[in-house]
Image (cartoon, helix red, strand yellow):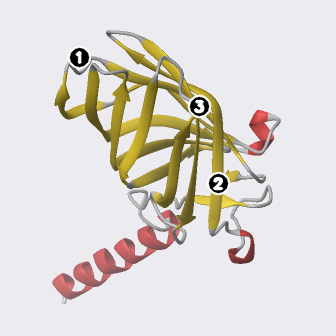
């Protein structure tokens, strides 16, 4: 009889602890790109499509640096951790130094909110062919290309994505610079808030 009471008491204590503590702290908070400044972001305010534009961005290499205008458009996944931008179009134009950058494979950006209006963005799956004059013909990939995303209430514009010396991975080519990094500020075409 004492054993049955002891087991019942232990079970009740465990249930009470779960109720008081609430959901597991291991459960990650969702990330949402929101069209208004609210947290959590209501379903009707969650952004479904987005466009960002940078002019210019700088590609830093061990041989030379050059600048280009750039933009990308993406569809935005449902609320998640991380939230995914599935890129539907990416362009590079007006590059100097006789360079061109052509996107040969589109990828995704994954966004993880780290605090109010701020998050980490990671690009993967992209492939870009780079030609500079008659000497450089190289293909680079975004393999965990890391940057930050800030919402409109922090930036004073529509919100932006920043890459600071984010490193490209050399995939193939001839006379390719050993180091190629990206410095860029992409500004959203409409207000974006980093919410949950």
Q: Residue 127, percent across and down?
A: 32, 45
Tell me the crowding category of disc 2: few under 14, some 14 to 19, or many 20 or more residues within 10 angstroms, Cα based. Answer: some
Q: Is disc 1 placed on a helix, strand or loop? A: loop
Q: Which image quarter: residue 108?
A: bottom left
Tell me the crowding category of disc 1: few under 14, some 14 to 19, or many 20 or more residues within 10 angstroms, Cα based. Answer: few
Task: Report how far apart the C-alphas of labels 1 and 3 lie in the structure.
Answer: 24 Å
> Is residue 195 visible in this depiction of the protein?
no
Residue at the spot of label 1: 178
Tell which circle, 1 or 2, labels the residue nearer the N-terminal end: 2
Q: Which image quarter: residue 16?
A: bottom left
Of residues 27 and 13, which is closer to you in this image? 27
Residue beneath the point at 37% across and 79% down: 12
Q: Residue 89, percent across and down?
A: 51, 57
Q: Is disc 3 placed on a helix, strand or loop? A: loop
Residue at the spot of label 3: 94
Residue at the spot of label 2: 51
Residue beneath the point at 44% across and 52% down: 110
Task: Report how far apart the C-alphas of labels 1 and 2 lie in the structure.
Answer: 31 Å
The circle on residue 14 is none
Marks 1 and 2 in Cβ contact (< 8 Å): no
Q: How many marks?
A: 3
- Horizontal side of residue 181 vs 44, given as left or right: left
Nearer to us of marks 1 and 3 is 3
Residue beneath the point at 78% across and 52% down: 191
In the depicted structure, whether residue 95 falls above or below residue 3: above
Task: Report how far apart the C-alphas of labels 2 and 3 lie in the structure.
Answer: 19 Å
Q: Residue 1, percent across and down?
A: 18, 90
């Amino acid at each position: 009889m004492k054993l049955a009471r002891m087991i019942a008491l232990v079970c009740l204590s465990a249930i009470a602890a779960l109720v008081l503590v609430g959901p597991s702290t291991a459960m990650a908070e969702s990330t949402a790109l929101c069209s208004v400044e609210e947290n959590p972001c209501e379903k009707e305010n969650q952004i479904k499509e987005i466009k960002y534009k940078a002019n210019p961005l700088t590609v830093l290499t061990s041989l030379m640096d050059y600048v280009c205008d750039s933009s990308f458009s993406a569809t935005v996944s449902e609320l998640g951790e991380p939230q995914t931008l599935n890129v539907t179009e990416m362009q590079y134009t007006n590059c100097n130094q006789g360079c061109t950058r052509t996107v040969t494979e589109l990828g995704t950006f994954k966004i993880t909110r780290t605090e109010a209006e701020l998050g980490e963005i990671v690009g993967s799956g992209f492939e870009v062919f780079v030609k500079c004059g008659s000497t450089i013909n190289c293909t680079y990939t975004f393999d965990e290309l890391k940057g930050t995303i800030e919402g409109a209430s922090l930036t004073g514009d529509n919100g932006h994505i920043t890459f600071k010396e984010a490193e490209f991975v050399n995939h193939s080519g001839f006379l390719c610079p050993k180091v190629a990094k990206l410095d860029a500020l992409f500004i959203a075409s409409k207000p974006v808030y980093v919410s949950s």
